[in-house]
Image (cartoon, coloured by chain):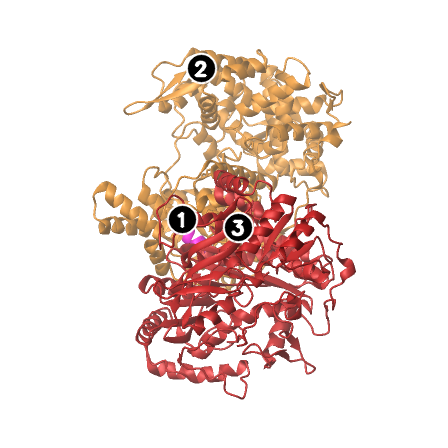
Amino acid sequence: MASNSSGGSSDRQRIAQQRLSIIAGHLQRPEDGEWAIGAEECKAQGSKPNVSSKGRTVPRRRQEIMKWNGWGYVDSKFQFNKKGQAEFTGKRYRLSGMVMPALKEWFESTFGASLQHKTPASAIPNSSAVQPPILNEAFVEDLKSTGIPFSQDAEDRVFRAHGHCLHEIFALREGKVGRVPDMVVWPSNHNDVVKIVELACKHNVCLIPYGGGTSVSSALECPPEETRTIVSVDTSQMNRILWIDEKNLTAHVEAGIVGQELERLLNESGYCTGHEPDSMEFSSLGGWVATRASGMKKNIYGNIEDLVVHIRMVTPQGVIEKSCQGPRMSTGPDIHHFILGSEGTLGVVTEVTMKIRPMPEYQKYGSVVFPNFEQGVACLREVLTLITNVFAGHALKPQKFYITKFKGFDPNRLCVATLLFEGDRERVLQHEKQVYDIAAKFGGLAAGEDNGQRGYMLTFVIAYLRDLGMDYYVIGESFETSVPWDRVLDICRNVKERIIRECKERGVQFPPLSTCRVTQTYDAGACVYFYFAFNYRGLSDPVHVYEQVEHAARDEILANGGSLSHHHGVGKLRKEWMRETVSRVGMGMLKSVKDYVDPGNIFGNRNLL
Amino acid sequence: MASEAVYSHRDPMLKKRDDFEDILEERRNCSDLRYALKCYTPVVYKGLTPCKAGVLKNMVLQSDQLHYVINQVSKETGKAPEDVQEEASAILEEMAHRMQLSTVRFFAFTLCKVFKTLFRSICVNEEGIQRLQQAIQEHPVVLLPSHRSYMDFLLMSYILFTYDLALPVIAAGMDFMGMKIVGEMLRMSGAFFIRRSFGGDKLYWAVFSEYVKTILKNGLAPVEFFLEGTRSRTAKSLTPKLGLLNIVMDPFLKGEVFDINVVPVSISYERILEETLYARELLGVPKPKESTSGLFKARRVLSEDYGSIHVYFGQPVSVRSLAEGRVNRCQFNLTPRHIPKRPSDDVHSFVNAAAYRLVRAQEENMVLKPWVLLASLLLQNHHQDLDQDRAAGPERGMGLDELTEEALWLRDVCRQYGAFLHWPDHVPPSEVVSSSLDLHRGLVRISEGRVRLAVEHAAGPSGPGVHPGAGPEEQLLNQAVVVLSCASYRNQALHVFLRPALLASAMHIATSSNKQEVFNSFSFLRNMFSNEFILCPGATMQDFEEACFLLVKTGVLQITEQEVLSTHRGHRTLAFLTRMMDPFLQGYQVICMFLCEEASEALTEKTFIPAVRGFMVKQLLSGRLRYTEVLSSDLQKNALAALLRLGAVLKTKGADQTTLKVNRVMVNSLEDTLGGKLPTQKAAVARL
């Protein structure tokens, strides 16, 4: 166990560490000792998901490596082996190949689920269920002459017809397919996109930009009422770093690049962006810009809007971009803010200049256990007022998952904060000490680096867990909001309770999982995630029930001073609340921008407005 | 009868209510001491973190809300914040309860003894108790008992102790605190004391509201207060006061708790301890200051029989579901929640509507005893006797058989209207009547088989407030005491008959049977009397439809597209209903008359009541006015409030007093409309 010598009474920490070595057994550790992490000199691997080191881009036929009806890679998933123990398959993650005996018990006791009651997904996409493409022949002819690759293959089209909302995945698992794009094109650079958009305008074809496909706002769903040809513009082949400017610490990158690849390529030159959303393995730079993404290290590096210096977007009216790379401008409203969060309604983001930083010299995980959530939140608030921008923290509500017992703490109430410190060694250690000192004031006990790293890693695999649940009658989702500090506890309590109550009223037979965590901290508030899942045995239309409950939960969030979304975006799922969120005038402003930029509604995914 | 299909009212006869259990029965059979010392382990709110009284005070004093107001007050007055903090602390000290189980046990023991001598039974619906127990665990609870007697809050705590439920903290008027030892004892049994008026005192308001909210939010104890604000001297429900209700709803509206359960409790007394006391108060004898010695003088009271008490714990009402779709909680998103703000219009109207709904819930579950019906009938008979000038003749009063027959008829009408009537069906009707009359023998005379109100030798010697002097006036006031006491029993049933009675009166004053015209009259009366009775704001249409539904269902009216017609057999009901309203109609008319004819320019708010009373006494003595009931200051105040609301009288604030300015034209037209001399449209115009 690593040196946690800073702060508090070292004696108490020693005891805590002993205890932790026992707790660590809850997730079995592989023999090879790869788990023994200490404060390590930061190399490329660090915290990141184990990116296979060969420079593999996202292939055009994504279904070859990624699930067509679930999260992530085909070879990686949770499953119960013959002994009834949970394991994680594949070789990609630290968790891969590990057996997790505690998971089954947690799964069964939390949801009342049973391994006997299975709900397997249909195995292969059923091509006959897919509507034949509506093709605009003239467009196809003109497109052919440009030489840009495209496809009308049913599998390609189905893959790009959805994001990862529960209802989308649930339908796919049942083999149900609705309106899908009629064709997919793969531009390989900015000019290709310009050509595609010109042709689309000329032939009145609907374009839907597609980046990483990780949307959870129904943003990628094709509007069923769309009668024109829908073309999915897959940006995955636009994935190069065009240049790195070390003088100004910027990099100019094509917008189709996915997060892990961007980090890997930059790391090779000794840099990083520090933008690490939970979906960074699959989500793309263009997608981040289009949805106003946020990463877990934003307290050090900033959110996407803080990171971009220059954006280039192709719209039906032409290309929009600024004339220089000045770090800040006072030139009227920032046109970047028409683009950031436009959710594919105005055009395709093709190239972005981003801030980069030298890779941190030193990186250290940590974690603190608090007797309860209230104390944890109070501590995060305090940490933020005293030391800004040094620390990425998560307060996790009862994480029975990997910490179950802790001295003197009620296991049903305890809560864990995972910490990551980055920077030069001295400052990291100094901050670490400060943070643990503050934590001690709120009754927190240092719970070691191991737990910190594990919590961090879990954020990448948690999405795989939903697929496991769906094999056994359990459906669920997470959704997020941002809220001022003084309302964090109130919103958490009320939304959780609302979820439980709504489930009861809608005939859900088993008590639902309804929990939350604080995932981001700001001076003026925090980002809160809610996790909601339930066992749907006995319900005839579980997805509808799920949607009603989520809808009620969102109403409750808004009534408690929470925002419509912190970073997931609006898409079509949360459109109905936009007007009250941004006011009638605000809506009018957004509409008039859309009307000017895209009068023919070429970018017709109908998100946002 | 097409209308039945149109009006989708649930038939009030189908209203389901719980059964009662007498909690005194067990007390009569086993040791009171053992009862008082029993093991008391109530269930508590699931989210409760227990805390001591001192901690509670600190929580209040440390709260952001209070800090904000302290700084504000300090800036405005120039006092040092520490001094203001001291003031706040002193206010809290004066206010806060100090609940002690030992005191509660002492009260439990004493009350046992008292209750057993005073009452035949105390009946409680146990299902309601179970619902309450459930509610207490789930969410913070607010108890809203009706308020008819000093007994109410002791009784509430007694019942909750008996059933092992969490004891409430009770908002009590400061006047109780004046009662030396008793005040402190009440404090130790959970009462906290608030000043009667503190309108402009920001600091007081802040301490008070924060104190209540802190108790409620943390689920430390159920909070109990009286929606009506004070004891109703007339047994009619009073217009709800919104101050405390606003405070207790605030934590929900601001998202500080998930929900709050509000439990209306209906306490009905077969015979009210303060019966004649109230009547005298209404006639102008000032309320005696609460004092310990006064309480002991009340010992005379102990030797009498006060029948039974029924306590009905109503269905807990979730504030969340009340507010659903009515209040946009997002309105609290844009300012910090600890900064005090006036409730917005929609919050105000929501709280107001909720308050009316809750008072109506109290009314609906009030148990009516047969005497209530007898009192109604005897009062009407009394007035008929006066009308027909046989007040002294041998045919005055009603024959016992006649009374019984009428009571049975009225019982059936009552039930059809959905009243919660406790008429013992297994006992012969004549016995029911005679035992009721016996219990209230102070108010009736029975001679030669005829029953009448005991008006000529008024009950007891004249009190200190009834001015000796002119013989006839004294006699009149003594009669009025009996009439008002009787009326207070009739009033218990008013809510049952109110809507049909308003319709009956509306038909009476309307110039034709045209439906629209009848509706206009109904709407006029409803508007006129909305300070007098509990009539939910904005529910004119529903009330009209409800009245139509009941009267059509019972065969009293036929309603077509165009017309409202009475049936032949409906005459009796209509006559009864109009007579029920008459004293109020006449009272308001007389007040209008007074304002037009007698009111001087110098009439002030303070002199209004005595002046009106003087005018009325003259009218009564000269025989131009029949209903002594109109002498009730409650009616007079309500009428004035209505006239002020309608703009027929205006207040002008002077240096030291508020004078009343009368719009004679308007008052005159209101008077004529009440008397049926003017069509209602005209009055409606006058109102504009």
Give the residue at mark 3.
Answer: A314
Q: Which chain is red?
A: A
- Residue A128 percent coordinates (x, y): 79, 59
Q: Quadrant of residue B496?
A: top right
Give the magenta part as a residue range.
Answer: B210-221
Up-down: is B432 above or below A164?
above
Q: Is residue A162 left or right of residue B617?
A: right
Between the C-alphas of marks 2 and 1, the distance is 50 Å
Q: Which chain is orange?
A: B
Evaluate if marks 2 and 3 touch, with contact meaning CB atoms under 8 Å apart: no
Q: Say whether mark 3 and mark 2 are on the same chain.
A: no
Q: Is residue A178 left or right of residue B241?
A: right
Residue A242 or A174: which is nearer the viewer?
A242
Which chain is indicated by disc 3?
Answer: A
Give the residue at mark 1.
Answer: B337
Rendered residue at 39%/28% (across/down): B465
| Chief secondary structure of the magenta portion | helix
Which chain is indicated by disc 1?
Answer: B
* Mark 2 vs mark 1: in front: 1
Amino acid of disc 3: Val
Local secondary structure at mark 1? loop
The image's mark for residue B594 is 2
